[in-house]
Amino acid sequence: MSLDAPVLSGPGAGRTVTYGGGSSAELKLAGEQSAGDYAVVEWHLQAGDEPPIHTHTREDETVYVLDGAITAFVGDQRIDVGAGSYAALPKDVPHGLSVRGDQARLLITLAPAGAEYFFVPRDDSDTDPDKFGLELHDPAPAA
């Protein structure tokens, strides 16, 4: 970790973007705060707003399920997980998820930083997956 100063981001204190069917992403730690080493996003994900299966070509991603339950798709595996579950996903591994129930709350870490702005766009240019080395595949199968 390369931090120049302490970072405290209380509930709802980070820049938040709402999209889709009521999902939102809150930037807890921007890459600029960690010298580009990593970034953290809290993701409130509604059923129906899930991303398609995708591959990160630049960063590793971790996912911690804070609330709710999801079905995770990692490579050719399908795994049902609930609150308290953690996954570490290396770059170049196809993955995705489906919300089980109405919603889930996830803590996402990306290392190195950069793709946090796909979750919490700064402007319209940040909605292009190619900008972040994200390869989108078929939609996630139904849970």
Image (cartoon, grey):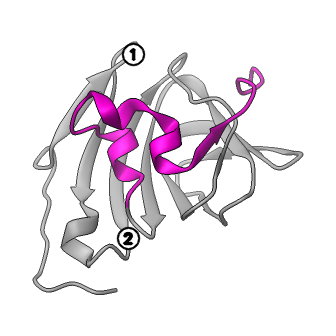
Q: Which of 123 and 111 is in front in this view?
A: 123
Chain part drawn in magenta = 114-143
Disc sitting over residue 47 in the figure: none
Q: What is the crowding at mark 1: few (fewer than 14 residues within 10 Å), some, or many (at least 20)?
A: few
> Which residue does the image show at 15% across and 43% down from the upper left?
15
Q: Mark 2 points at which residue?
A: 38
Q: Which of 24 and 134 is in front in this view?
A: 134
Secondary structure of the residue carrying tag 1 is loop
Instruction: State the CA–CA distance, disc 1 to disc 2.
Output: 26 Å
How many numbered marks appear? 2
Looking at the image, can residue 19 be seen?
A: yes
Q: What is the crowding at mark 2: few (fewer than 14 residues within 10 Å), some, or many (at least 20)?
A: many
Q: In this view, does 78 lie above or below 37?
A: above
Residue 123 location in percent, x, y?
22, 33
> Which residue does the image show at 70% across and 23% down from the upper left?
139
Q: In this view, does 129 lie above or below 87?
A: above
Disc 1 residue type (three-letter) = Gly
First of labels 1, 2 by sequence position: 1
- Asked where in the image residue 118 lies, by quadrant, the reply is top left
Q: Name the residue under label 1.
A: 20
Residue 45 location in percent, x, y?
44, 30
Disc 2 residue type (three-letter) = Tyr
